[in-house]
Amino acid sequence: MQYHRNRRLRASEALRSLVRETVLSPADFVLPVFVIEGSSRREAISSMPGVSRLSIDLLVKECRELYQHGVRAVNIYAKISENLKDNAGTEAWNRDGLMQRAIREVKNAVPEMVLMPDVALDPYSMYGHDGIITEGKVDNDSTNDALARMAVSQAEAGADIVAPSDMMDGRVAAIREALEENNFKDVGILSYSAKYASSFYGPFRNALDSAPKDFENIPKDKKTYQMDFHNSREALNEVYKDVEEGADIIMIKPGMPYLDIVAKVREAIDLPIAVYHTSGEYAMLKAAAASGWVDNNLALMESLTCIKRAGADMIFTYAAKEAAKLLG
Ligand code: PBG
């Protein structure tokens, strides 16, 4: 006689929802946004269907709409013109730079929105690297000084949480210290602790024109700072260091192919975990859906739910608004 019938609790949607372990909410999402100069400008990004670069006025409008749909956090990237780029990424801490103006204006218009600007030099680097190049290498410690200045300028503009995505060693401590010294003790740090050197960032680098550039004697990839995807224990080592250095939220990136890392970090720490559903993952879903090979809405909700099930407290996703609407 069979007593254990797991199918009993799957018999109806009402029953299934009663025993459901993971439920998505629009409040789980952070939308990454790309800001450009100008007004009333919207540039579609061909590698990311449904995603556009926006001028500040349109970004403000978008943030109001997002907030109404329950998405209450944005992660901001600025696309600056090529002639403002240099090796040190100087434009990154220009008080009146595009990023700083965007933060100021959005904060002013939608003060409740959580603003999480990206901290990294790649959109500002003439070489397309997240750090300063010295003798053909990405130099760790001078980069940390630059990142600390960048973070302070974002805090000054009104950022709630700064999000270093560069993978230099010791940058969380450097940023924390600079924020404290400048009296931004309440500005938090979301650290990309376990960020892997991944091919899933391709569409994003397209969107920002931030891929490593083809210069002689300059590394063509980011493998000396981003993690090797063959490794898993190393992620814990990265996470523990960032926790010690004062990170408030830990990021793991990419998302779907790295859920083993998410589950492992979830077991190890009690800080909130963010997971990045990257541009490549988004583009793959959109391409398959456009060909009619997967159902867009079902595959999207399944993907995001599985990221949360693995242990994410929040999900960075380009589909934030779309998913929030589907959640109704
Ligand atoms: C750069 C940065 C990248 C992403 C976020 N910040 C790209 C990279 O490291 O080359 C990727 C985001 C995505 O693919 O969605 N510091």
Image: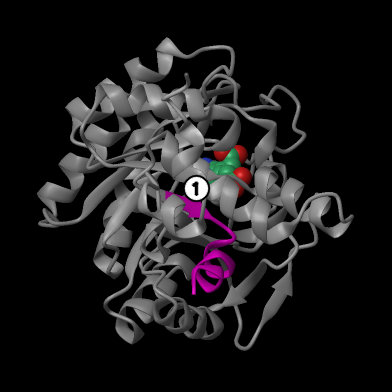
Q: Amino acid at mark 1?
A: Thr
Q: Position of residue 56 (x, y in %)?
A: 51, 79
Quadrant position of residue 247:
top left
Q: Position of residue 294 (x, y in %)?
A: 79, 50
> Which residue is denoted by mark 1 in the rendering?
305
- 165 or 145, which is in the foreground? 165
Q: Position of residue 315 (x, y in %)?
A: 45, 50
- 19 or 215, which is in the foreground? 19
Q: Does residue 85 lie above or below 322 as drawn? A: above
Q: Does residue 8 lie above or below 268 as drawn? A: below
Q: Is residue 210 visible?
A: no
Q: Does residue 72 lie above or below 143 as drawn? A: below
Is the residue marked by circle 1 packed among few (<14), some (14-19), or many (20+) residues within 10 Å? some
- Figure label count: 1
First to last magenta residue range = 315-328
Tell whether position 31 is magenta: no
Extreme residue in the right direction: 291
Q: Position of residue 272 (x, y in %)?
A: 27, 42
Residue occupying image coordinates x 65% and y 48%: 279
Residue occupying image coordinates x 34% and y 46%: 313
Q: Is residue 143 visible?
A: yes
Q: Taking the image as four quarters, which one is ligand 1 found in?
A: top right
Instruction: Report whether the residue tagged 1 is closer than 8 Å to ligand 1.
Output: no
According to the image, what is the colour scheme of the structure? Answer: one colour
Quadrant position of residue 221:
top right
Residue occupying image coordinates x 34% and y 25%: 265
- 128 or 303, which is in the foreground? 303
Left or right side of 2 for 250: left
Q: Secondary structure at mark 1?
A: helix
Left or right side of 123 for 98: left
Residue occupying image coordinates x 71% and y 42%: 202
